[in-house]
Structures are given as structure tokens and as C-alpha cells.
Image (tube, rainbow, N blue to C red):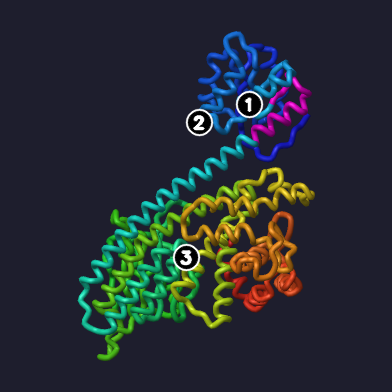
Amino acid sequence: MTVPHTVSRPFTVLVVDDQPIIVEGVRRLLSVLPDARLESCMKASEALARAKSLRPAVILQDIHMPDGDGLELVERYRWEKDLAETSVVVLSAEENASTKADAFARGADDYLVKLPPPQEFVARVQHHADAARAQRERNETFRALERAERDLARRNALLDEANAKLARDNRELVVDADTQRERLDRIARLSAELARVQDLDILLGRILREAVSLAECRAGAVLLADRDEQGADILRVAEVVGANARGRAHAPAIPLDPGTVAGEAAISGDTMRLGAEACALAGKSAPPIGIEAVLGDRAASALVVPIVRGRDRALGCLILVDGRSGEAVGSVGFDDSDERLVAHFASLAAVAIERAQLVRSMILRMIAMAELRDPTETAGHVGRVADLSIMLYDHWLAARGQGEDASSTRARDALRIGALLHDVGKVGISDAILKKPGKLDDAEFTEMKRHTQIGADLFAGLRTDFDESAAEVALCHHEKWNGSGYPRGLAGEAIPLFARIVAVADVFDALSSKRAYKDAWPREKISSLFRDESGKHFDPEIAALLVAHQAEAEAIRARRPE
């Protein structure tokens, strides 16, 4: 006899019965499950300690034992925190209805009259083992979220302290011109704005664009410390902005060592200012700056400022190139005021980046949990959906003549995080459905649709800025413009805007991706589908934006492979 099960993971079954023949019978029956490890205990007095030590997925408990009451043991199992995720199944010769009722009242998950037919017995044990594993995974997810929330609260307190210090520093700065006063005003507004930004990419882009603007330079980049696949310390280009600058996909990783100006600044914690002569030698007789691959043009001047956290460990560095200071007297480059300005930005960024990295880590853990359940829900897929959603939202804003401000930054932040977590509710759907190779039947599809509500419920009790957006996107990204979607059958603009955007981004990425069961669709077929489904499945305006900017969407996908 073979019994299919969804995931190959070892699990333990503890049989508590004083009859060796029953234990042996169970052993023979479960021999068809290669993942099942059988343990036995023939004394009631030892059963509780044995169960706490093993933490089995399933306990098969006899009622009548020479040295104790099996039903009392069932109740005691349920008192133990270590056994909260264990399925307890009574295995007894009694068929009395009142005995069964008593067993369930004391916390039993099932009642089997020993021994039932082999196929039924094995199927039930497998079912209870899967249920115990799923409960353990859910509990671990929520515990991880609780820990992350506590850590996030602590980081926010540190950010408040840092902002207070920055406010004191601002008051102590000597400003002798209107330009300097404007810079400080903009930094103060940016500090308050960044305190509410949760997503790392949105945060870095906002910091860098403001730094390039205030320093009046051509381009800039943020490099963050990381490790490569071999565990070596490196700097990665996390964000690039400015004239002629190329996307970060063109930037190779930089070793975190003195072989580049960026590496030297990150290691030493010292600011590096390069004039025209030093830039001319960079990469020739002197170390390169480190971001030549994304500059577009050779730098004529550069300012490299380390981003350092409180424990003096480098988070990375902020690099600006081709400053305009000193043009009035015929020179081009960065001066002391620029250096103070960018150092101020770097200190402002340090705590905010660390907090955003914590949020990103929490989100990636949630995505990794979903990926364990659904192999199609990869970090690459959700990252591309998030990038595509931001692109569509930016074009939606541009169509209304709206540029970037504090409000749109917060909206982009909330949208990106909601897009990253749009399918996280799949952690609550059984493996049998998520990993079924063929088409789902009606009952299975009905169960699958529950992932939208499960995802929304994950954010119901939390208290961060992105909760509302994440809940809306998780709940409504399968709604359709004509009202034929689920779970609520919303139509038109009754569907939240972010959910309408994520729906288009999600389908575009899915159609553009090769899977085990399909090839990637050609671009003409994809654009045809969005035209055909405009006003049916998709918001007509968002679908039209996708088709109009399909080449940009394809370039975004190429930057983030599986």
C-alpha cells in the first residue's frame, strides 16, 4: 500500500500503549510512510516526560493502562506548551459514545478504535502529522513577526533619538547664506519624511535624489555592505540617480577592501574628497572610485562619505560625483559645505537604513515562508511585482501631473511593501492544493481563494504604517474590474488603487516568466491579453499604462532574475 503525502519531512509518532502487540501493529502499518519515525512508551507514568522530550507530531494514546488513566494524560498533554502543536489521537478498543465525547472534551484531535483498516489508519496519521507541521509553521511565522515588531519598535526609538540629535546638530550649524538655510530646511523636512518610510529601496532613492539635488551635482550612488555567495564582504550598488547614470544592474559587486575609494571609505570611516586630478588618476595609477560602471561618464570630481551605524560598523557609503561648487571662480568640485552636507545626509541615513533593513528582513522571512509552501512564490517574483507596481504608480501619478513629494513617497513605500506581500496568505493553504500539478477542482479552488483573506488577516493586529496597504493588496488583488473576481466581487474603483496596480504587475510577471508547466509568453501575446482584458479583468487605465511602457517593464524584469 502506498500513501501520497505532500511534503517529504521526517516526523515522529509516539505510541502510548502497554500492549506490545499494538505497538508492533502500528509499526507495521506506518512502515509505508518513509518519513514516519515510531517511538513507544508502555507506562502512563512516563508518557508525559517522554512526549515533552520527543515533541512528536502525533501521539497515539491508549485509554486504559495499568498505571494510569489515558484520558487524564490527554488532558495533561494539552496543558503543556511544548506539545501545543502535537496532534493527540486516542487509540482504544472502546466504542462507547460517552467515552469518545469525554476524550474530545479533554482535547483529543481524533478517536480511533484499534486498530482501524490499514489504509484509513495510515491516512489519518499522515493527516494529523501534516496538520501538526502546518500549525508549527504558522506559530513560528507569528512568533517571528512578534519578535520583528519588538525589534522594530526598538529601532524606531533609536531613530527618534537620532532625529533629536540631528535637530540639535542642525541648530548648531553655522549658516551664512540663504542657500545654506534652504538646505537645512529641506534636510529637516526630509528627516521627518524618512521616519515614516519602511521600504529600503524607496528610502535609498529618496535620500539619494535629495542629496544630488542639494549638492547640485550630476549623479550619485548608495553602496551597501553585503556578502557574496562565498561569504566575502562586498559593497553592492543599491541605488543610482542622476544624469547619464546607468541602472544598478550594470554595477558589479565591489570587494570591501582598500582596492577602491568606496571600499577604503567604508572600512576607515573617513570621508574621501577627490578633485579633477585625483579623478583623472582613479582606476589608472590610483584605486578606482568603485562606481565607474554606472556613472555613464568619467567623474571630474567625487565625494565619498561612509554610512556608519552606532557601533562604528559600516553600512556602506554615499557617493556624489561632478559637483558644481566654486563655478563662480572657474573651478568645479565639492567644497567644505558640501562635505558637511553629505556627512549630515549619511548620518541621517544610517539609522533609517538600518531600520528599513530590519523591515526588509522581516518581509523576506515572510516571503521565504510562503515560498516553502508555494514554489512559484519566489523572492524574485515578488520583487519584480513590487518594482513593476512602483513603475505603474509613477506613470499613473505623471498622467495626473503629480511629482514626488512627501505624500507620494509614503504612498510608494506602502505600495511596494503591499506588493511584496501580496500572496503571503498562501502560508495558510494546504500543500496538497499549493503543490498540485494539475488544475484545481472547484472545492480546491474555493480553498485556494481563502489566501486573500488569510493574507489580510495577517496584518489586522499589527501597528506599522504599511499594514493598511498590505491588507488591502492581499485581500483585493484578485478582484476584477467587471466585478467577477474574488473574494468580495468588487468592481471598478471600488477596488483599491494599489490592488488594481498589483493585479496588473502580478499577471504581467507571471506571463513573462518561464515555469515548469509553461514557457514565457512573447511580448505581443502579453500586450494583446492586456488589451483584451482591459475593462474586464484589469483597470483600463493601468492596463493601458502597462502596454504603453511594456519595454520599461521588461527592463525592470531583467534586473531581477529568479
Mark closest to the chain's N terminus, 2 or 1: 2
Measured in 3D between alpha carbons, the distance from the residue under mark 3 to the one under mark 2, in whole angstroms, is: 40 Å
Question: Which residue lies at the image location 29% right of the left edge and 56% below the top edge?
Answer: 310
Near-viewer residue (342 or 421):
421
Question: Where is residue 556, by image quadrant?
Answer: bottom right
Is residue 125 shown above or below 222? above
Q: Give me the disc on residue 105.
A: 1
Residue 454 left/right relative to 317: right
User: Residue 108: percent from the left, percent from the top?
Assistant: 64, 27
Near-viewer residue (319 or 144):
144
User: Residue 75: percent from the left, percent from the top?
Assistant: 57, 23
| Quarter in which the C terminus is drawn | bottom right
Q: Of circles 2 and 1, which is in front?
A: 1
Label 3 sits on residue: 201
Considering the numbered disc 3 on the image, is that residue within a helix, a strand or a loop? helix
Label total for image? 3
Q: Of circles 1 and 3, which is in front?
A: 1
Per the rendered image, the range of residues in magenta is 111-130
Q: Inspect the image, locate mark 1, and give the three-letter code of the amino acid beneath it.
A: Ala
Mark closest to the chain's N terminus, 1 or 3: 1
Measured in 3D between alpha carbons, the distance from the residue under mark 2 to the one under mark 1, in whole angstroms, is: 18 Å
Measured in 3D between alpha carbons, the distance from the residue under mark 1 to the one under mark 3, in whole angstroms, is: 52 Å
Near-viewer residue (191 or 79):
79
Q: Of circles 3 and 2, which is in front?
A: 2
Considering the numbered disc 1 on the image, is that residue within a helix, a strand or a loop? helix
Q: What type of secondary structure mainly makes up the magenta span?
A: helix
Considering the numbered disc 2 on the image, is that residue within a helix, a strand or a loop? helix
Q: Give me the disc on residue 81.
A: 2
